[in-house]
Image: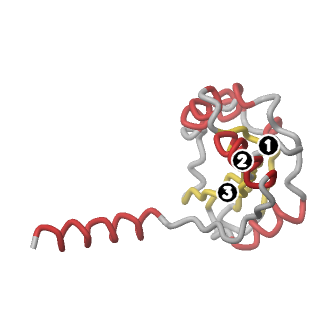
Amino acid sequence: MDDLGPIEYIVVGFAGNRFTGDIAPALTELMETGLIRIVDLAVVSKNADGGVTILEMQELSAEVASAFVKLEGSVRGLLSEADLEEIAEGLAPDSTAAAMLVEHVWAARFASAVRAAGGRLILSERIPHAVAVEARASLLSAAAS
């Protein structure tokens, strides 16, 4: 287990229940280059009336499932029913979310080295895209002045 990279829980949402599998090629590319491994993936949908459908990968529609076919075999079913129900509670009506557990394979060697050196992770925080873009724009603006 020491060679396991950090695992991240990611949930991405799609308004209007427009989850079509368009994200699959990007995930496949990341997997094929060895940067990530999909540990689990499920889809949660809420219709306009508030009814919820939870689908594991093998239960997706043929159109969406075909986009994710290369991810088959990496999925292990670690997302619990409770995890997926919690996502459903937070979903707006007429929307869909894809929940994923992603192993950052690229970081496995570094994580092993930290553990072997007696170190431990103290903080890991994802900076939202909009915040990074705004900070970069402010820095570039200040440098241009």
Which disc is residue 134 wearing?
Answer: none
Label 1's element?
A: strand
Which residue in the protein does label 3 denote? 10
Q: Quadrant of the C terminus?
A: bottom left
Label 2's element?
A: strand
Q: Is residue 145 above or below residue 57?
A: below
Which disc is residue 39 wearing?
Answer: 1
Q: Quadrant of the N terminus?
A: top right
What residue do we see at 66% from left, 45% from top? Answer: 107
Q: Earlier in the sequence, mark 2 or mark 1?
A: 1
Quarter-of-image position of residue 68: top right
Which one is nearer the viewer's eye here, 127 or 40? 127
Picture coordinates of residue 87 (x, y %)?
75, 66
Picture coordinates of residue 15 (x, y %)?
55, 60
Mark 1 residue type? Val
Q: Residues within 10 Å of mark 2 (few under 14, many from 20)?
A: many
Mark 2 residue type? Val
Which residue in the protein does label 2 denote? 102
Q: Residues within 10 Å of mark 1 (few under 14, many from 20)?
A: many
Q: Is residue 85 left or right of residue 128?
A: right
Picture coordinates of residue 13 (x, y %)?
60, 59
Q: CA distance from mark 2 to mark 3?
A: 7 Å
What residue do we see at 80% from left, 44% from top? Answer: 4
